[in-house]
Amino acid sequence: MDRRIFLGFAGPSIIVMLLLMVLPLAMAIWLGMHFMTFDNVLEPQWVGLRNFVAALGDERFWQSFNFTALYIAVVVPSWIVIGFIVALLLDQVTGLARGVYLSIFLLPFIIVPIVGTIMFRQLFEPSGLLRWVYQELLNERFRYTEQTVKALIFLHGIWYVTPFTLVVYFAGLQTLPPDLMEASGIDGASRLQKIRHIVIPHVRSLTLFILLFSIMDSYRVFDSVFVLTGLNPLYKANTIMTYTYQTATQFERLGKANAMAVLTVIGIMVVLIPNLYLSWKEQIAER
């Protein structure tokens, strides 16, 4: 395609994306270099890099970072493994039943996040079904503690986003050549051998895509933590997003909150750049 034609079509989108990404980031950096509260929001005080230094020296910031990293380490592999397994099972179903099962699996992902989280939490209220199951199985009352609240956050994250990975893997399985599977079956390959040597390599690029999306999505988790914890410090379950929100709204440190947001963007880039490089290498290898 001619370069002029390409720029004519892609130029407006590129300009819009730059305006939507570069300008807010530049504004956040500028605000992060000022001492700003709701009282002096029109006349912020220049402090340079003090807010960035304060954020990096804030123990609660690192606690929220550690919990966010733990959240990513728990839920992202769960999304990939569970989504892949369910997609394999769903691929064996045909006819109307496939559409019914797929619709059921997609329900958590379709529901508005806040509404879905509230519904999920109600299952553990005094009259909730899962609370009753918990008490019947373990013969003890369910209590909201640091450990149980964190477990609920992980469980909700897995329940809510796994349908996305399921759909991606299921779509990838539909492009798998059936002749290849039949030929491997004639050669005596078992079901597990087919999955290991044919299916998994076939969806490798999809796995990298899911990994990139999942890391970005889980790094900015906010809704579920906000609803399940009520931002109660006793649970020690703040993520970077919830602590940034608290810093801005409750502590009224708008400059520091912007500095933390910039540091969060930097952290996301540090995590994503190696994965983007792997994805690029994967695309090159497939050509």
Image (cartoon, rainbow, N blue to C red):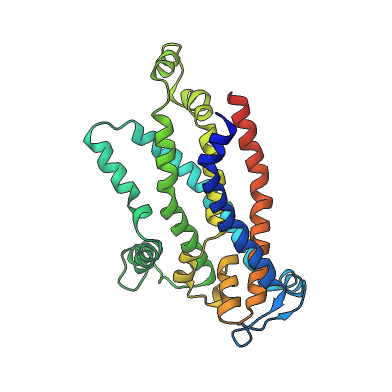
**Coordinates of residue 121 in the picture (x, y in percent):** 38, 67
Relative depth, front residue between 21 and 197: 21
To which quarter of the image does residue 185 belong? Answer: top left
The reply to whether residue 236 is visible in this rendering is: no
Q: Quadrant of the N terminus?
A: top right
Left or right for 237, reference 181 = right
Residue that protrudes farthest toward the bottom in the picture: 39
Q: Residue at x 46, y 17 (%)?
A: 189
Q: How many marks?
A: 0
| Residue 265 seen by the camera | yes
Name the one closer to the observer, 126 or 105. 105
- Of residue 282 and residue 130, the one placed in the foreground of this image is 282
- Is 42 positioned to the left or the right of 58 in the image? left
Q: Is residue 151 above or below residue 33?
A: above
Q: From the viewer's perspective, is residue 93 above or below residue 137?
A: above
Q: Residue at x 62, y 83 (%)?
A: 42
- Residue appearing at x 69%, y 51% in the figure: 270
